[in-house]
C-alpha cells in the first residue's frame, strides 16, 4: 500500500541523519518541517519533505491520500517500560494509601507485587492474553507504537514462563512492536520469604536457561530496592542473564537510593528506570556509560514520590527517556501523552525535551532506535496525526485531553 499525507502543518521529530539517542542540550532541539508531506509504502516511511517540493508522483494507482491541513504528524510514542500483563487491578491498595498506608507497608502485609502474583498464578494464559491485548489496543489509540512488556508477576518457574509465553503470543497478535523482559526478580515470592538465596538460584539455574532455550525474552530486569534485591544481587542476577544473551535493565532508586544505577552501569544495562532518589554520584556513573536514564512520571505521580532530577541529568549532558510503567500497583495508566505532560509540568522538561524523551530515547531504551522513535526514511511507519492543534507544545499543555485523531501502525490506518 502507498500512502501520502499532505499539507501537514508540522512534521515533528524528523531525522535526516539517524541518531541512536539524544543527550544533554541536544534534547532541546526537536527537528520539524512545517507545511510538509510524508510518504509511506507498505510498512515503512519512504520519503518526506516540504510542500514546496511536493513529490513528482507518476504512478497514482492505489495511492491513498490523507489531507492533514492544520494537523501535526508525530512518530508514535515508544513506551520502554510496562507491566501490562496482569490478572487484576488493585484499587483497594490505592484506597489504603489514601487512608495513610505506604506502598511498602502494603507490600509487607502481602499486598503489592505479591498480590498481583497470587492472582496471576490463578489466571489462564488465554485470559492474560485477552486482557493484555485490550490494554495494548487502548495504548495504541493513545499513540503508542512500540512497547516493552515485563514478566514479574509470576515469581515461580511455571508462572514466569506463562507470562513470557503470553508476551510472545502478544507479539504475534498485536500490530505494535513489542520487546519482552524477564523480571523474575521483581519481589521475593512468599514461599521463599526467608530463603531469598534459593529463589535467586532458581532464577539463575532454572528460569534463565529455560527462557533462553525458548527464546522468550530480550531483556532481564530486577527491582533493586530495600526489601527487594540488593545492588550485589542485582549484579549477580544480571551478570548471569547476560550469559544467557539477555540485556540488563534495572528498576533503580524508586523508593530509596539502593545502588541500582551503579549496579546497572556496572553490568552495562541498556536502561535504569524510575530514578526518584538518584544522587550526584549516580549521575557521574551514568555519564561514563551507554545506559539510558529512564523516568516513569506515572509511578512517581501515583505514589507521590519525589521528582526525579531530570533537569540535573540533562544539564550534566545525559540523555533522558520517558516511559509509562503501566502496571496495576504504581501506574495504572499507559497513556504516554499524560506522561509527557507530567514531565513538562512537574519536572520542567521543555516540550522538545519531553518529546525527544518519549520517542527516540525511549526507543533506544528498548533497542529500537534504529527502526522507531523518529520520522526517517526506512523507519517503521508508526505515526500519529493530531486533531487540528496550534503547535507541538499544545500536546503536553493540553494535559489529559485526547488530541490524536489518526493512528497509523506498520503503514496501516488503524484509527481515523
Ligand atoms: O515499576 N517497582 C517495582 N515494580 C513496579 C510496581 C509493581 C507493582 O506494584 O505491581 C513499578 O513501579
Ligand atoms: Fe516497573
Image (cartoon, rainbow, N blue to C red):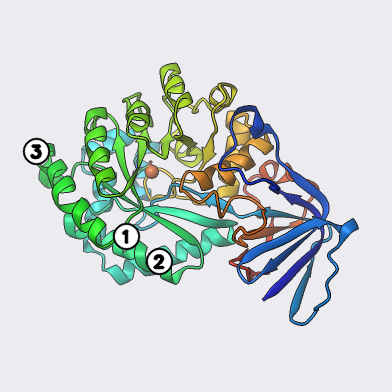
Task: Say whether disc 2 or disc 1 marks the residue closer to the N-terminus.
Answer: 1
Residue at numbered disc 2: 170
Residue at numbered disc 1: 87
Asked whether residue 99 appears in the rendered view, the answer is no
Residue at numbered disc 3: 195
Residue 116 percent location from the top left of the image: 28, 52
**Above or below, 57 relative to 282:** below
**Above or below, 333 relative to 410:** above
Question: Is label 3 or label 2 in front?
Answer: 2
148 and 374: which is toward the camera: 374
Residue furthest bottom in the image: 61
Q: Residues within 10 Å of mark 2 (few under 14, many from 20)?
A: many
Give the alpha-carbon distance from disc 3 to disc 2, as whole Å: 34 Å
Residue 156 percent location from the top left of the image: 17, 53
Q: Check whether the beta carbons of the residues at disc 3 and disc 2 lie within 8 A of each other.
A: no
Q: Quadrant of residue 314?
A: top right
Amino acid at each position: 500500500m502507498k500512502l501520502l499525507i499532505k499539507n501537514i502543518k508540522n512534521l515533528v521529530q524528523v531525522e535526516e541523519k539517524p541518531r541512536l539517542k539524544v543527550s544533554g542540550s541536544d534534547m532541546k532541539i526537536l527537528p520539524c518541517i512545517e507545511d510538509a508531506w510524508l510518504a509511506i509504502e507498505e510498512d515503512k516511511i519512504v520519503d518526506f519533505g516540504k510542500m514546496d517540493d511536493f513529490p513528482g508522483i507518476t504512478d497514482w494507482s492505489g495511492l491513498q491520500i490523507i489531507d492533514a491541513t492544520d494537523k501535526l504528524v508525530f512518530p508514535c510514542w515508544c513506551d520502554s517500560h510496562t507491566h501490562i500483563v496482569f490478572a487484576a487491578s488493585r484499587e483497594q491498595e490505592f484506597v489504603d494509601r489514601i487512608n495513610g498506608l505506604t506502598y511498602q507497608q502494603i507490600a509487607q502485609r502481602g499486598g503489592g507485587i505479591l498480590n498481583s502474583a497470587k492472582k496471576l498464578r490463578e489466571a489462564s494464559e488465554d485470559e492474560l492474553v485477552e486482557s493484555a491485548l485490550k490494554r495494548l489496543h487502548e495504548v495504541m489509540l493513545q499513540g503508542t507504537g512500540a512497547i516493552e512488556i515485563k514478566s514479574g508477576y509470576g515469581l515461580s518457574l511455571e508462572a514466569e514462563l506463562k507470562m513470557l509465553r503470553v508476551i510472545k503470543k502478544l507479539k504475534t497478535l498485536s500490530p505494535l512492536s513489542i520487546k519482552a523482559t524477564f523480571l523474575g526478580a521483581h519481589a521475593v515470592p512468599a514461599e521463599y520469604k526467608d530463603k531469598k538465596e534459593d529463589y535467586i538460584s532458581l532464577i539463575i539455574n532454572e528460569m534463565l536457561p529455560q527462557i533462553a532455550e525458548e527464546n522468550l525474552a530480550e531483556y532481564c530486569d530486577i527491582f533493586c530496592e530495600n526489601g527487594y534485591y540488593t545492588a550485589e544481587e542485582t549484579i549477580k542476577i544480571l551478570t548471569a542473564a547476560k550469559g544467557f544473551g539477555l540485556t540488563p535493565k534495572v528498576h533503580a532508586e524508586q523508593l530509596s537510593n539502593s545502588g541500582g544505577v551503579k549496579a546497572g552501569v556496572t553490568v552495562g544495562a541498556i536502561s535504569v528506570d524510575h530514578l526518584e532518589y538518584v544522587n550526584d554520584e549516580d549521575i557521574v556513573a551514568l555519564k561514563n556509560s551507554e545506559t539510558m536514564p529512564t523516568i516513569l512520571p506515572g509511578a512517581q505521580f501515583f505514589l507521590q514520590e519525589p521528582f526525579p532530577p531530570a533537569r540535573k541529568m540533562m544539564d550534566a549532558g545525559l540523555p533522558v527517556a520517558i516511559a509509562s510503567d503501566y502496571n496495576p500497583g504504581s501506574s495504572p495508566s499507559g497513556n504516554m501523552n499524560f506522561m509527557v505532560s507530567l514531565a513538562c509540568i512537574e519536572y520542567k522538561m521543555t516540550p522538545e525535551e519531553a518529546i525527544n524523551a518519549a520517542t527516540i530515547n525511549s526507543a533506544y531504551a528498548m533497542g529500537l532506535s534504529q527502526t522507531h522513535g523518529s520520522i526517517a526514511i526506512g523507519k517503521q511507519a508508526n505515526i500519529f496525526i493530531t486533531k487540528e492543534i496550534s503547535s507541538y507544545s499544545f500536546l503536553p499543555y493540553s494535559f489529559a485531553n485526547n488530541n490524536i485523531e489518526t493512528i497509523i501502525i506498520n503503514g496501516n490506518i488503524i484509527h481515523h
